[in-house]
Amino acid sequence: MTARHYPSPPTDVYLFATCLIDLFVPQAGLDAVRLLEREGLTVHFPRKQSCCGQPAYTSGHPREAREVARAQLDLFAEPWPVIVPSGSCAGMLRHHWPKLFEDEDEHDDNAAPRARALAERVYEFGEFLLHVLKLDFRDAIADAAKTERVALHTSCSARREMGTREHGVKIVDALPGVTRVEHVRESECCGFGGTFSLKHPDISGAMVKDKVASACATQCDRLVSADCGCLLNIGHAAQQSGAPLAVEHLASFLWRRTTPANGDV
């Protein structure tokens, strides 16, 4: 992963909400919007957006993934940053959408340069807060007396393609009243892996069982992640086994920890 140049804070951004947030964790998307709007940004949400194409791509179906991407290239036409509240989906847009069109000659629609141009404007949510908006949560308004012990989880592709763990660590460590605790299996896959969990349920189940046990061993109050697929997998596994592990998306966690009880900001 190479270092990237970060622009000055913009006035307008797009939100690529991801299909998992849209269908299963809409509050995380709403909280991401509220955090961005609180910083004075206008957030645009193209309603025809859909999946990033990652399930098809990682299952060996690049043609299908390419058509998913092609249908969305024109939805983000303005030169605004595209914020993605999922590290793995952000990695798909930034690193793999351009690859989908590298050797294509079936269409004369300039899809390859359009995909490359869009990829350059894609930012993972925590990355954007930290490196573009340069937010410092050390002076967060919320009641710092309410302490929490938090374990982090970063999806495999988010960690390796977008450096998302670094963003989460720096943001959480700056929050008053929050103590980040590390667990021994933090760097390991949770077993979700998109379609992997469907193709290999026994292996996936064993992996998430280890992940839940590792997080619980820290006696953390909750596990926080910026990747909804992992959150759903870990949260449901904990619930099914009766493990005392709450999970929360980074956007919702930040909104809750940095907003006074009366809602004034």
Image: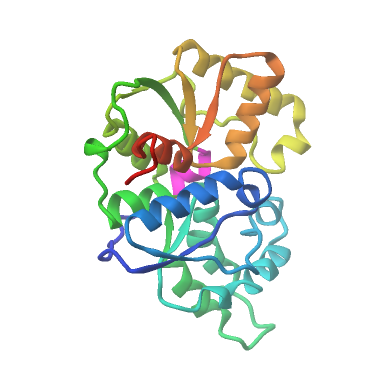
Kindly indicate the quadrant of the structure image that contains residue 138: top left
Given residues 205 and 140, the one toward you in this image is 140
Picture residue at 41% right of the left edge, 24% below the top: 150
- Magenta span of residues: 155-161
For residue 159: magenta?
yes
Q: Is residue 93 above or below residue 187?
A: below
- Image position of 24 (left or right of 94): right
Q: How many marks?
A: 0
- Measured as percent of width and height from the top left, residue 25 is found at 61, 43
- Image position of 17 (left or right of 79): right
Given residues 230 and 221, the one toward you in this image is 221
- Measured as percent of width and height from the top left, residue 235 is found at 62, 27
- Measured as percent of width and height from the top left, residue 244 is found at 57, 14
- Measured as percent of width and height from the top left, residue 96 is found at 54, 61
Q: Is residue 201 above or below residue 5?
A: above
Picture residue at 52% right of the left edge, 39% below the top: 156
